[in-house]
Structure formats: C-alpha cells, structure tokens
Amino acid sequence: MCHLLFFCGALKDAGASQVTAVTPYLCYERKDRKVEFQDSTITRHVARLMESCGIDRVAPDMGGIKRAEQFRQALAQLLARPVAMAMVEKHRQHTQLSGECLVGNVAGSTVVLFDDIISTGQTLLRAAQACHGAGASRILAAAAHGLFTTAGALFESGMFERILVADSITPFRLPAACRAQLDIFDTSALVAQRLMP
C-alpha cells in the first residue's frame, strides 16, 4: 500500500495531470462500515491517504446486487435467452453470519452464485445450501477475489461443481486437492481495456 502511495505521489510530483490507481484487490476495502461502537471505517481513511498522494480515481465498489444484476444481464446476452435472478439474505454481526432466506425460484436450475470476495467461504456455502435445499440442479460459484483464508469447508462440501475467481490474488493458501475444483480467470486484458481512452 505504501509503495502504491509513494509511487502515485511521485508521479504527481513529476507533473502527471491525472493518476488512476488500478487496485483489483485492496485488502482494506472490506472495512467500509462500522460494526461495533467506536469502530473505524478504514476504507474512508485509505481513500483520504490516496487523495493526499494525488490519486484522482480508484475503481469503486458498486454493491453486490448491482454486480449480480450486471452479471445476469451479460449472461443472458451471451446465452441469448432469459436468465432469472435470486438472492440469499445475509446478516453479519461481529464475526457471526446469519440469514438463510432465499428469494427467487431456483428449482431445477443451474445456479451461479456470485460474490465479491471468498475468504472463509461461509457466505457462498450458506447460499449453496439454501439453493440446494430449494432444488437447484447444479451450483457454480464466481467471485472477484479468492483470499481462501480458511475455505477448506467450501471445497469439501461437495456443493459446488466449479469455482471461478479472478487472478488478483494467488490462491497460495489452498491445498492442491482444492485447486482442482478452481478456475482462475486472467483479468489483464479486461483491465487494459478499461484503461484505454
């Protein structure tokens, strides 16, 4: 993080008129709201640091529902047929995760569970269990970032046919047996395309 800030500051010092930081994964992005009294919203402070070093733009987090809807629309266009959307509620209090209510019909369907980050995998696992209980025929998962801090249960559950993540983080924490179920997507062309004027 400090290297990024120093580098961007040096670019501004050298006369760059605009600096855009491409941060496919920024570990501080997960702390964007207060969970407990006197909690710090670290994301806000990191944004201030970036601004003070001359960074003009950082790719924003648009929210899970919006990302899922964009994914649904792109998939429907690619398949040239309608694609339905469902969602599973999630509530996080401190380190506890709750919420099992599935909104939408997934019976007999191939389900693609879409999330931003896989850390322990509990969010995806709970969603997969809800979809499986509602009669989904196949369950796949896609996430932007695969941290896989303690995600063994995700792979051992037998719920997922395949799991796709971007190449923003090397899955070094995963045992080789789990990696056989994992697909890693190379994002370099997509990032380059977004940066072109």
Image (cartoon, helix red, strand yellow):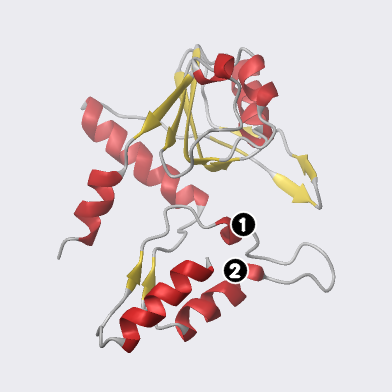
Looking at the rendered structure, the kind of residue marked 1 is Arg
Residue 50 vertical placement versus 145 (above, below) = below
Q: Position of residue 95 (x, y in %)?
A: 80, 47
Q: Is any atom of residue 55 visible in this view?
A: no
For disc 1, the neighbor class at 10 Å (few under 14, some 14 to 19, many from 20) is: few
For disc 2, the neighbor class at 10 Å (few under 14, some 14 to 19, many from 20) is: some
Identify residue for label 1: 30
Determine which quarter of the picture holds residue 135.
top right
- Between 43 and 34, the residue placed more toward the observer is 43
Q: CA distance from mark 2 to mark 1?
A: 7 Å
Mark 2–mark 1 contact, CB under 8 Å?
yes
Q: Position of residue 169 (x, y in %)?
A: 48, 42
The residue drawn where x is 17% and y is 61% is 196
Q: Position of residue 156 (x, y in %)?
A: 66, 15
- Between 151 and 102, the residue placed more toward the observer is 151
| Quarter the C terminus occupies | bottom left
Determine which quarter of the picture holds residue 110.
top left
Mark 2 and mark 1 lie on one chain; the one further toward the N terminus is 1
The residue drawn where x is 28% and y is 52% is 191
- Between 158 and 7, the residue placed more toward the observer is 7
Q: Is any atom of residue 118 visible in this view?
A: yes
- Between 135 and 48, the residue placed more toward the observer is 48
Judged left or right of residue 90, residue 80 is: left
The residue drawn where x is 42% and y is 53% is 24
Determine the residue located farthest toward the right in the rendered image: 37
Judged left or right of residue 100, residue 155 is: left
Determine which quarter of the picture holds residue 46.
bottom right
Element class at badge 2: helix
Residue 153 vertical placement versus 116 (above, below) = above
Identify residue for label 2: 43
